[in-house]
Amino acid sequence: MSQELTRDRLLLLGRNFMTPRILLTAAELDLFTKLKDNPRGIEDLCTAEGWDRRGLRILMDALAAQGLLIRGTDGKYGLPEPVRKYLVSDSEDSILPMILHGCSLWKSWSHLTRIIKTGENPNVTGRASRPAEEAAEETKDFIEAMDVVGRSMAPIIADSLDLSRYTRLLDVAQAHTQWPFCEKRLT
């Protein structure tokens, strides 16, 4: 049964976007990759990246409060091991592309009220007016996100099929969530 809809629960539902937005912003800044080799302080990062000190301090303290960063007594921030493994761009196990794709989804979902009111979807109609660089970055994030999904799904799919008589395989689309045998193997 779902939780009781109390005043506090409803207020929490209205603010639940804040926690993931902190992670999405850190991903867009590639902050975890910038901290992968050694802990760094606010001044060092702001000087190197041209970022705002106050904004970065708020972000990094929020990330530390969530356990995504470790703040040392020297004021430098480092990475806990799971963050180093999953949120650093060049890690073999990185899921950062999925998080970055979440940034694109965030933009799309931000127009939901307008879509309901007008029936117009600026995510579709506004694509032509978006800068080419932005569209290319979103496409790259999507493709890399699908690669993250494919890394874990490909062995399951391959193991479920007898491909011994074939010499070539073409992956046309990753519609694996629609394949019943994948659901069985994953549960």
Image (cartoon, rainbow, N blue to C red):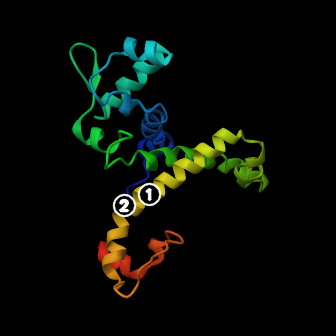
Callout 1 crowding tier (Cα within 10 Å): few <14, some 14–19, many ≥20: some
Q: In the visual, does 150 lie left or right of 93? A: right
Q: Is mark 1 on a helix, strand or loop?
A: helix
Spot occupied by residue 31 in the image (x, y as percentages of width and height): 40, 30
Which quadrant does the N terminus fall into? bottom left
Q: In the visual, does 95 lie left or right of 52? A: left
Q: In the rendered view, tell whether residue 151 sits above or below residue 71.
A: below
Callout 2 crowding tier (Cα within 10 Å): few <14, some 14–19, many ≥20: few
Q: In the rendered view, tell whether residue 54 sits above or below residue 118.
A: above
Residue 51 visible (yes or no) = no
Q: In the visual, does 71 lie left or right of 132? A: left
Spot occupied by residue 68 in the image (x, y as percentages of width and height): 31, 35
State the residue position of label 2. 151
Q: Do the residues labelled 2 and 1 touch (CB within 8 Å)?
A: yes
Amino acid beneath label 1: Asp
The residue shown at (32%, 70%) is 155
Spot occupied by residue 50 in the image (x, y as percentages of width and height): 51, 16
**Disc 2 to disc 1, C-alpha distance:** 6 Å
Q: In the visual, does 154 lie left or right of 175? A: left
Residue 86 visible (yes or no) = yes
The residue shown at (44%, 57%) is 147
| Quarter of the view holding residue 33 | top left
Which quadrant does the C terminus fall into? bottom left
Which numbered tag is attached to residue 98?
none
Q: What element carries label 2?
A: helix
Spot occupied by residue 48 in the image (x, y as percentages of width and height): 44, 16
Amino acid beneath label 2: Arg
The residue shown at (41%, 84%) is 166
Which numbered tag is attached to residue 147?
1
